[in-house]
Amino acid sequence: MAANFPVFSMFSKLSLLVFINLFFYPLIEGKDGGFSTHLIHRDSPKSPLHNPSNSFFEMLNKSFHRSFARAEYFKKRVSQSRSKHSSNSSSAPIQSHITSAGGEYLIKVTIGSPPVDFLAIADTGSDLTWIQCKPCKRCYKQDAPLFDPNKTTTYRHLSCNSPLCSDPGTTFCDFRNKCGYRASYGDGSFSNGDLSTETFTFESCSTRNVSIPNVALGCGHASGGIFQETSSGIVGLGGGALSIIKQLNGSIGGKFSYCLVPRDSNFSSKINFGSNAVVSGPGVVSTPLIKQIPYKGLSKPDNSSPSDFPGGNIIIDSGTTLTFVLQDFYQRLEAKVIKITRGTPVSDPGGQFSLCYKVEKRLKIPKIVAHFANADIKLPPDGTFLEVSKGIVCLAIVPTDGIAIFGNVLQINHLIGYDLVNKKLSFLPSNCTKYK
């Protein structure tokens, strides 16, 4: 991308950014603490957010609007982070790097003993998992009943002496010597309540369920903002001490992976943990997983070199549909694509994209290669160009004056693995519909 630029890294916390805004559906349990579960896109007929009155193109264009809003939020978040860093402010509450109700996936979690099902936003930028609880002084409206800690035998409100009650940006000690939490988000949404532990149970496809005891859980007694009624809270998949991923580290070894299917597929995407998450075999490429992702640039198969399109750092985000690159970089990329594309240029009827073509037999779209450090990713033409309306395709890589984002469309049909212990991100071209 244009030049090296600092990034508020989701990778400092994780980087699924896999907003994963997912659904945990029936898990497939493996050996050595490995398990897998299906992911449901928010626009899937299986999702409670699905609106059957919307056409495919209407849903797609709404995801574009969410992408632009999300990119703008990241830009503001970076600015806030720099401002706090320059002023050496450490007392302000830590904010999630994503909006509370955005993203492309939800996650289904089962909490307590006996277990109760909830839908929540999966957020790799947040560490703490929280849900709304009884009694609730101020709660947003949700479809599911509020969680009642008095009706579960495994709920434990933590004392201030607990090692989990040591995050100055999230936890605090109240007058009862009990641990509390405060979570705030960039869109003004928030949740406050008690920090506790609970048992998380996942329904397995095998003969027994997968239970995780003593997972940190925020029991929210005051929450508000733009949360949707289908969501009961947030599932924190970040890399901090309070996240589920960190607490599961002993059994999953800091590894998880996911494989996203095309939007129009009848199959579900899948996320894997532990031994199930290993990405290996012919065609695997890996890049260092660091606070600022080492991205070298893009090139085309016409002898252009990565140096023609210098890189910087980029966020891998499954919660953003489109891919965003810096303005200067985009201008050079667009000029090169125009030069080698064969087709009839047309205008985008939605006014969101600057480079579009008519769908016709003579249309020839170039293949683009994304160059990460030590890892070249060949991007399929049907990922770089999307049919945004009937008979019109547009370049799904767009300019920004904020930070670069590698969106979920370019991640489709790639098995993407995260090894947080060895700090490695791996890619393997795959037919994700075959992962069952």
Image (spheres, rainbow, N blue to C red):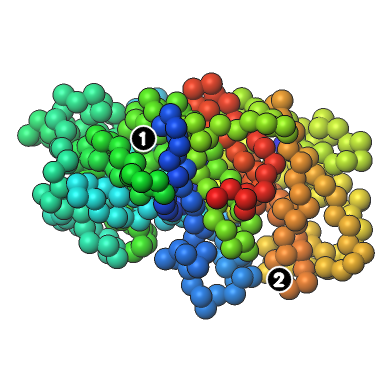
- Left or right of 370 in this view: 220: left
Name the image quarter holding residue 302.
top right
The quadrant where residue 212 appears: top left
In the picture of the structure, the residue carrying the numbered disc 2 is 389
Q: Which mark is residue 243?
A: 1
Residue at x-position 15% and y-position 37%: 157
Q: Position of residue 148 (x, y in %)?
A: 16, 53
Left or right of 351 in this view: 256: left
User: Where in the figure is residue 358, as x and y percent of width and height?
Assistant: 83, 68
Out of 343 and 47, give the one closest to the viewer.
47
* Outermost front residue: 207
Q: Residue at the location (12% across, 33% down)?
A: 178
Q: Position of residue 431 (x, y in %)?
A: 67, 48
**Could you tell me the amino acid type at mark 1?**
Ser
Check disc 1 and report its element: helix, strand or loop: loop
Going by the image, does 312 lie left or right of 219? right
Residue located 54% across and 24% down the image: 423
For badge 2, the amino acid type reads Ser
